[in-house]
Amino acid sequence: MILGYLDAEDRAYDLNFATLRMKIRIGPVAPSRESQVVFAPTGGAERSYRLLGEAEATASVSMDHDGHLVPLLRPVEGRLHRHERGLLFIAAPPKRDPEDPSYFLVRLRAMPSAVKYFFEDQEGTEIVSIPADEILRIAEAGESLRIHVSAANIALPKEKLAYAVDLGPATRMRPLLEGMPLSLSR
């Protein structure tokens, strides 16, 4: 799972604005010219996955500590893309607070001027990428659908972290997520 940021040149960053040395983009890929989600690590092999559907969505993310949810991403509007290997949400809020432009609820170690530059000049935005094999289950959660995710901890790769990703409205998300392969072997 990737929680982070994407700039106008498709460069991906983690929650502390450190580069992930990867570009993530959506667009037609030769020779088929059909839309695909492309993950292109610097110096690595590019991976392209056929786009299966997309919809306007509102997303929020919480860490799940044995059923106690700790908010990590405030609800933000954007676009959800379903591809062959998972989901990619790209935020597109209609307006940002100039004093607190990020929708992630993490303390940023970057200087305020650098954060402002990222969101205003580099047209940065939040991203959430969920590989299908990290999805435990999808359940109703009020007006949204909640995706329960188990992902590796970056600091301790053998340790798994649990997340709850809410996507809404449920009426718009249900057709997009229908038939989503769920991994129940956790």
Image (cartoon, helix red, strand yellow):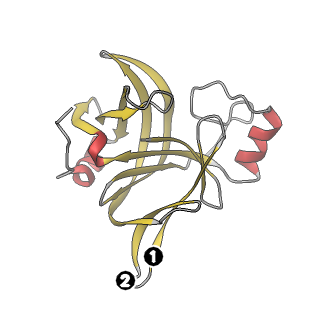
| Secondary structure state at the residue bearing disc 2 | loop
At x 49% / y 44%, what residue is drawn?
77
Frontmost residue, 114 versus 183: 183
Separation of disc 2 and disc 1 at Cα? 8 Å
Q: Quadrant of residue 52?
A: bottom left
Q: Are dots 2 and 1 in contact, CB under 8 Å?
A: yes
Q: Is residue 167 visible?
A: yes
Image quadrant occupied by the C terminus:
top left
Image quadrant occupied by the N terminus:
top left
In the rendered image, residue 180, in percent from the top left (x then y), is placed at: 21, 50
Q: Is residue 69 left or right of residue 98?
A: left
Q: Is residue 93 visible?
A: no
In the rendered image, residue 75, in percent from the top left (x then y), is placed at: 48, 34
At x 30% / y 15%, what residue is drawn?
66
Q: Which mark is residue 28?
A: 1
Frontmost residue, 88 versus 139: 88
